[in-house]
Amino acid sequence: MMPEEPRHKLSDRLFHWIMAILVITLLGTAFLPILGLKFDWIPIHWISGTLLIAAVIFHLCRALFVHGLKEMLPTAADIKMSSAPEQKYDLNQKLYHWSVGTIILALLVTGGLMMAKIDTPFWKRDPSILTDWNWGIVYVVHGGASMLLIFFFILHIYFAFLPEHRTLLQSMIFGKPVGQQDNQNDK
Protein backbone atom coordinates (compact mmCIF):
# COMPACT_ATOMS: atom_id res chain seq x y z
CA MET A 1 0.00 0.00 0.00
CA MET A 2 1.32 3.47 -0.93
CA PRO A 3 1.99 5.77 2.02
CA GLU A 4 -0.59 8.52 2.39
CA GLU A 5 0.48 12.03 1.38
CA PRO A 6 1.04 14.42 4.29
CA ARG A 7 -1.82 16.74 5.22
CA HIS A 8 0.57 19.72 5.01
CA LYS A 9 3.60 19.76 2.73
CA LEU A 10 6.90 20.97 4.14
CA SER A 11 6.72 24.31 2.27
CA ASP A 12 3.25 24.96 3.70
CA ARG A 13 4.36 24.08 7.22
CA LEU A 14 7.43 26.31 6.91
CA PHE A 15 5.24 29.17 5.69
CA HIS A 16 2.90 28.66 8.65
CA TRP A 17 5.69 28.71 11.25
CA ILE A 18 7.60 31.58 9.59
CA MET A 19 4.39 33.58 9.48
CA ALA A 20 3.70 32.71 13.14
CA ILE A 21 7.17 33.94 14.18
CA LEU A 22 6.78 37.12 12.15
CA VAL A 23 3.29 37.84 13.51
CA ILE A 24 4.42 37.27 17.11
CA THR A 25 7.43 39.54 16.49
CA LEU A 26 5.19 42.23 14.99
CA LEU A 27 2.67 42.01 17.82
CA GLY A 28 5.49 42.11 20.38
CA THR A 29 7.22 45.10 18.83
CA ALA A 30 3.89 46.91 18.52
CA PHE A 31 2.48 46.31 22.00
CA LEU A 32 5.45 45.80 24.37
CA PRO A 33 6.50 49.49 24.13
CA ILE A 34 2.91 50.48 24.96
CA LEU A 35 3.11 48.23 28.04
CA GLY A 36 6.26 50.05 29.17
CA LEU A 37 9.09 47.89 27.77
CA LYS A 38 11.33 50.43 26.06
CA PHE A 39 13.58 49.33 23.16
CA ASP A 40 14.31 50.37 19.58
CA TRP A 41 11.31 48.55 18.14
CA ILE A 42 10.84 50.37 14.81
CA PRO A 43 13.63 48.61 12.82
CA ILE A 44 12.52 45.17 14.07
CA HIS A 45 8.91 46.01 13.25
CA TRP A 46 9.39 47.26 9.69
CA ILE A 47 11.86 44.49 8.78
CA SER A 48 9.46 41.84 10.15
CA GLY A 49 6.60 43.51 8.27
CA THR A 50 8.59 43.47 5.03
CA LEU A 51 9.42 39.79 5.54
CA LEU A 52 5.74 39.08 6.22
CA ILE A 53 4.79 40.81 2.95
CA ALA A 54 7.27 38.52 1.14
CA ALA A 55 5.88 35.44 2.94
CA VAL A 56 2.30 36.36 2.03
CA ILE A 57 3.26 36.90 -1.62
CA PHE A 58 4.87 33.41 -1.56
CA HIS A 59 1.69 31.98 -0.03
CA LEU A 60 -0.57 33.70 -2.55
CA CYS A 61 1.53 32.35 -5.44
CA ARG A 62 1.30 28.81 -4.02
CA ALA A 63 -2.42 29.22 -3.35
CA LEU A 64 -3.14 30.45 -6.87
CA PHE A 65 -0.74 28.34 -8.93
CA VAL A 66 -0.07 25.16 -6.90
CA HIS A 67 -3.05 24.43 -4.66
CA GLY A 68 -5.80 26.36 -6.39
CA LEU A 69 -8.37 28.46 -4.57
CA LYS A 70 -11.04 25.75 -4.57
CA GLU A 71 -9.46 24.09 -1.56
CA MET A 72 -10.27 27.12 0.62
CA LEU A 73 -13.54 28.30 -0.93
CA PRO A 74 -16.66 27.47 1.09
CA THR A 75 -18.98 25.13 -0.80
CA ALA A 76 -22.69 24.41 -0.59
CA ALA A 77 -21.84 21.14 1.16
CA ASP A 78 -19.86 23.11 3.76
CA ILE A 79 -22.78 25.42 4.39
CA LYS A 80 -25.18 22.47 4.74
CA MET A 81 -22.62 20.97 7.16
CA SER A 82 -22.63 17.81 5.11
CA SER A 83 -19.08 18.15 3.81
CA ALA A 84 -17.55 14.94 2.62
CA PRO A 85 -14.84 13.41 4.83
CA GLU A 86 -12.29 13.63 2.01
CA GLN A 87 -12.31 17.44 2.24
CA LYS A 88 -9.13 18.75 3.77
CA TYR A 89 -10.70 21.79 5.47
CA ASP A 90 -14.13 22.17 7.06
CA LEU A 91 -16.25 25.33 6.90
CA ASN A 92 -14.92 26.72 10.19
CA GLN A 93 -11.31 26.32 9.05
CA LYS A 94 -12.07 27.99 5.72
CA LEU A 95 -13.87 30.92 7.36
CA TYR A 96 -11.04 31.31 9.89
CA HIS A 97 -8.48 31.32 7.06
CA TRP A 98 -10.40 33.97 5.08
CA SER A 99 -10.89 36.11 8.21
CA VAL A 100 -7.22 36.03 9.19
CA GLY A 101 -6.20 36.53 5.56
CA THR A 102 -8.34 39.67 5.32
CA ILE A 103 -6.94 41.01 8.60
CA ILE A 104 -3.34 40.30 7.53
CA LEU A 105 -3.90 41.99 4.14
CA ALA A 106 -5.35 45.07 5.89
CA LEU A 107 -2.28 45.13 8.16
CA LEU A 108 0.14 44.70 5.27
CA VAL A 109 -1.43 47.47 3.16
CA THR A 110 -1.68 49.94 6.05
CA GLY A 111 1.74 48.92 7.41
CA GLY A 112 3.25 49.29 3.95
CA LEU A 113 1.83 52.81 3.74
CA MET A 114 3.12 53.61 7.23
CA MET A 115 6.65 52.67 6.14
CA ALA A 116 6.62 55.89 4.11
CA LYS A 117 6.96 57.69 7.46
CA ILE A 118 10.32 56.15 8.38
CA ASP A 119 13.82 56.27 6.95
CA THR A 120 15.26 52.95 5.84
CA PRO A 121 18.32 51.96 3.84
CA PHE A 122 15.98 51.65 0.83
CA TRP A 123 14.04 54.93 0.92
CA LYS A 124 13.79 58.29 2.67
CA ARG A 125 10.72 59.11 4.69
CA ASP A 126 7.95 61.00 2.91
CA PRO A 127 4.85 61.40 5.09
CA SER A 128 3.35 63.78 2.53
CA ILE A 129 2.01 60.89 0.43
CA LEU A 130 -1.26 61.11 2.42
CA THR A 131 -3.19 63.90 4.13
CA ASP A 132 -3.48 63.94 7.93
CA TRP A 133 -7.09 62.74 7.59
CA ASN A 134 -6.00 59.77 5.45
CA TRP A 135 -3.13 58.97 7.83
CA GLY A 136 -5.73 58.86 10.61
CA ILE A 137 -7.73 56.28 8.67
CA VAL A 138 -4.58 54.23 8.03
CA TYR A 139 -3.70 54.24 11.75
CA VAL A 140 -7.24 53.34 12.85
CA VAL A 141 -7.46 50.44 10.37
CA HIS A 142 -3.96 49.24 11.33
CA GLY A 143 -4.71 49.43 15.06
CA GLY A 144 -8.13 47.81 14.76
CA ALA A 145 -6.80 45.01 12.57
CA SER A 146 -3.97 44.47 15.09
CA MET A 147 -6.48 44.02 17.91
CA LEU A 148 -8.53 41.61 15.79
CA LEU A 149 -5.36 39.66 14.99
CA ILE A 150 -4.63 39.24 18.71
CA PHE A 151 -8.14 37.81 19.17
CA PHE A 152 -7.74 35.40 16.24
CA PHE A 153 -4.24 34.42 17.40
CA ILE A 154 -5.57 33.48 20.86
CA LEU A 155 -8.46 31.62 19.23
CA HIS A 156 -6.02 29.72 17.00
CA ILE A 157 -3.85 28.68 19.95
CA TYR A 158 -6.91 27.62 21.96
CA PHE A 159 -8.28 25.38 19.20
CA ALA A 160 -4.83 23.97 18.35
CA PHE A 161 -4.51 22.49 21.83
CA LEU A 162 -7.98 20.97 22.12
CA PRO A 163 -7.72 17.17 22.33
CA GLU A 164 -10.00 16.67 19.30
CA HIS A 165 -7.63 18.82 17.22
CA ARG A 166 -4.42 17.15 18.35
CA THR A 167 -3.99 15.37 14.99
CA LEU A 168 -4.27 18.73 13.18
CA LEU A 169 -1.55 20.21 15.40
CA GLN A 170 0.68 17.17 14.85
CA SER A 171 0.19 17.40 11.09
CA MET A 172 1.21 21.08 11.15
CA ILE A 173 4.44 20.08 12.91
CA PHE A 174 5.25 16.72 11.30
CA GLY A 175 3.14 16.70 8.13
CA LYS A 176 1.00 13.82 9.42
CA PRO A 177 -0.43 12.90 12.79
CA VAL A 178 2.12 11.02 14.90
CA GLY A 179 1.78 7.26 14.48
CA GLN A 180 -0.14 7.49 11.21
CA GLN A 181 2.55 5.60 9.31
CA ASP A 182 2.65 2.91 12.00
CA ASN A 183 -1.11 2.41 11.65
CA GLN A 184 -0.76 2.02 7.87
CA ASN A 185 1.90 -0.65 8.30
CA ASP A 186 -0.43 -2.64 10.56
CA LYS A 187 -3.10 -2.95 7.83
Image (cartoon, rainbow, N blue to C red):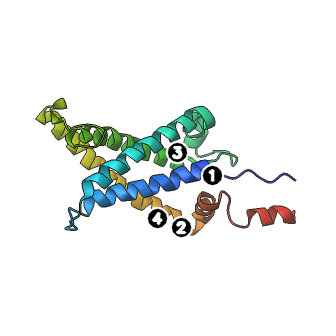
Residue hosting label 1: 10
Asked whether, in this view, residue 100 is left or right of residue 140, the answer is right
- Against 153, residue 135 (above or below) is above
For marks 3 and 1 on the same chain, the one whose residue lies earlier in the sequence: 1
Q: Identify the element where label 2 is drawn.
A: loop
Residue hosting label 3: 94
Residue hosting label 2: 162
The circle on residue 158 is: 4
Q: In this view of the protein, can residue 60 be seen by the observer?
A: yes
For marks 1 and 2 on the same chain, the one whose residue lies earlier in the sequence: 1
Q: CA distance from mark 3 to mark 1?
A: 20 Å
- Asked whether disc 2 touches disc 3, contact meaning CB atoms under 8 Å apart, the reply is no
Identity of the residue drawn at 48% across and 54% down: 18
The x, y position of residue 78, in whole percent, is: 58, 42
For marks 4 and 1 on the same chain, the one whose residue lies earlier in the sequence: 1
Quadrant assignment, res 25: bottom left
Mark 4 burial class by Cα count in 10 Å: few <14, some 14-19, many 20+: few
- Asked whether disc 2 touches disc 4, contact meaning CB atoms under 8 Å apart, the reply is yes
Closest to the camera, between mark 3 and mark 1, is 1
Give amino acid for label 3.
Answer: Lys
Q: Identify the element where label 4 is drawn.
A: helix
Q: In this view of the protein, can residue 99 be seen by the observer?
A: no
Asked whether, in this view, residue 35 is left or right of residue 14, the answer is left
Q: CA distance from mark 2 to mark 3?
A: 18 Å
Mark 3 burial class by Cα count in 10 Å: few <14, some 14-19, many 20+: some
- Asked whether disc 4 touches disc 1, contact meaning CB atoms under 8 Å apart, the reply is no
Identity of the residue drawn at 66% across and 52% down: 7
In the rendered image, the quadrant that contains the C terminus is: bottom right
Closest to the camera, between mark 4 and mark 1, is 1
